[in-house]
Amino acid sequence: MDGYIGIIAIIIVVILLGIGTTALLVRPRSKTTLPPPPAPTPQAPAPPVEEEVVETVAPPAVPVEELVKPPEVEVPPPSAGRMVRLRARLARSQTTLGRGLLELLSRDRLDDDVWDEIEETLITADVGVAPTRAMVEDLKTKVKVLGSRTPSEVRALLRAELLTQIDPGLDRTLHTSAPGERPAVLLVVGVNGTGKTTTTGKLARSLIGDGKTVVLGAADTFRAAAADQLQTWGDRVGAPVVRGPEAGDPASVAFDAVARGIADKADVVIVDTAGRLHTKTGLMDELGKVKRVIEKKAQVDEVLLVLDATTGQNGMRQAQVFGEVVNITGIALTKLDGTAKGGIVISVQRELGVPVKLVGLGEGPDDLAPFDPEVFVDALLGD
Ligand SMILES: Nc1nc2c(ncn2[C@@H]2O[C@H](COP(=O)(O)OP(=O)(O)OP(=O)(O)O)[C@@H](O)[C@H]2O)c(=O)[nH]1
């Protein structure tokens, strides 16, 4: 009996121990799911004051659109009055040609030696042989009629003579308005390095400044940089530039540019061409093809020959080759700012039988001016 009681007592004790253990293990759920308390973060030591300013002011994030923002389109000034603004750039021709002639013609005695010097001054300034002879003969006659000469009379005499040679009566209008709906088409030709691409870009700016819309054609596919250069000019003033693959067919670029001009209803399409003077036949083939292909779409209204005023007679010979290949309608005489040979205006018109319509008077984007004979002559003679 005592054995039973002992066993029962042990069982009761075991049951009681079991209940106690269960009570200890079974705790409320909320407490078991709580995350363990965060480990204390070690405190970073405070940086020195100057460093704090540099490190904590982060630059504001630049939105992607701003990074790829197209370049701002410039609004170029109109072309009117440009030659007056740029007349001081003719200083070198003024000193040598204008002032030189004024001084010689103002001498008391105009003997043969003085006339020889006058002739030499004109030849050195690239006036050309035939125009020089004509000028000297004219001046001799007028001086005789005049007798004694005051400085203002000498100036008036020379002014009239230079103007006669330059011929203010020539039509210097740039044909930038075509009849009907189509754009006017300008072809820019000339030897590489004369300033052809620069002149094309400057002209686009100037026309846009005068309120016209322009499409540019980079048909100088010979030199990849020429197309890039033109692209930069176009981008600055918002003129679309049609270009082709490097060493591609210039005629096809010219065609596409005119097609784009027609589609865009642009006022003017200016096509820059390559001016490699390899052989006359090669040049003729290339320029002839460009012109023929353009004419499938529209008439070419102006063929502008770009001529570097500093190259003198050499440049003139090259110009004549172009004159034999295409029908030049106007001359853009560049780099007149860098030469004392302003007389080239007279000789080039005489040799090619075409008027100077534009003059380049510097490397700045707005340094291309419509040629004004009176402003030119006054700039040569000084005030
Ligand atoms: N001082 C002066 N420099 C000019 C004038 N016109 C052009 N130039 C400079 O002449 C250099 C040649 O000009 P470009 O336009 O590259 O000559 P390009 O005839 O197109 O030559 P390619 O691109 O090789 O066909 C450039 O440095 C121009 O800035 C000007 O009227 N005055």
Image (cartoon, rainbow, N blue to C red):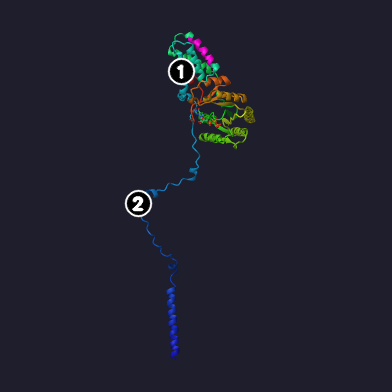
Crowding near the residue tagged with mark 2, few <14, some 14–19, many ≥20 C-alpha atoms within 10 Å:
few
Q: Earlier in the sequence, mark 1 or mark 2?
A: 2
Q: Helix, strand or loop at disc 1? A: helix
Residue 48's tag is: 2
Residue 303 position in % (x across, y down): 59, 26
Going by the image, does 149 lie left or right of 298? left
Q: Which residues are magenta?
A: 132-143
Image vertical order of residue 81 relative to residue 257, above or below: above
- Residue assigned mark 1: 100
Residue at the spot x=47%, y=45% of the render? Answer: 63
Residue 137 is covered by the magenta coloring: yes
Residue 286's tag is: none
Residue 106 position in % (x across, y down): 44, 13
Residue 17 position in % (x across, y down): 43, 79
How far apart in space, not on screen, are marks 1 and 2 (Cα)? 74 Å
What's under tag 1, amino acid-wise? Gly
Crowding near the residue tagged with mark 1, few <14, some 14–19, many ≥20 C-alpha atoms within 10 Å:
some
The answer to whether residue 160 shows anywhere in this view is no
Quadrant (top left, top right, bottom left, bottom right) of the C terminus: top left
Which quadrant of the view contains residue 152? Answer: top left
Residue 174 position in % (x across, y down): 55, 25
What's under tag 2, amino acid-wise? Pro
Residue at the spot x=44%, y=84% of the render? Answer: 10
Quadrant (top left, top right, bottom left, bottom right) of the N terminus: bottom left
Between 239 and 150, the one lying in front of the other is 150
Between 344 and 212, the one lying in front of the other is 344
Residue at the spot x=43%, y=85% of the render? Answer: 9
The answer to whether residue 151 shows anywhere in this view is yes
Residue 269 is covered by the magenta coloring: no
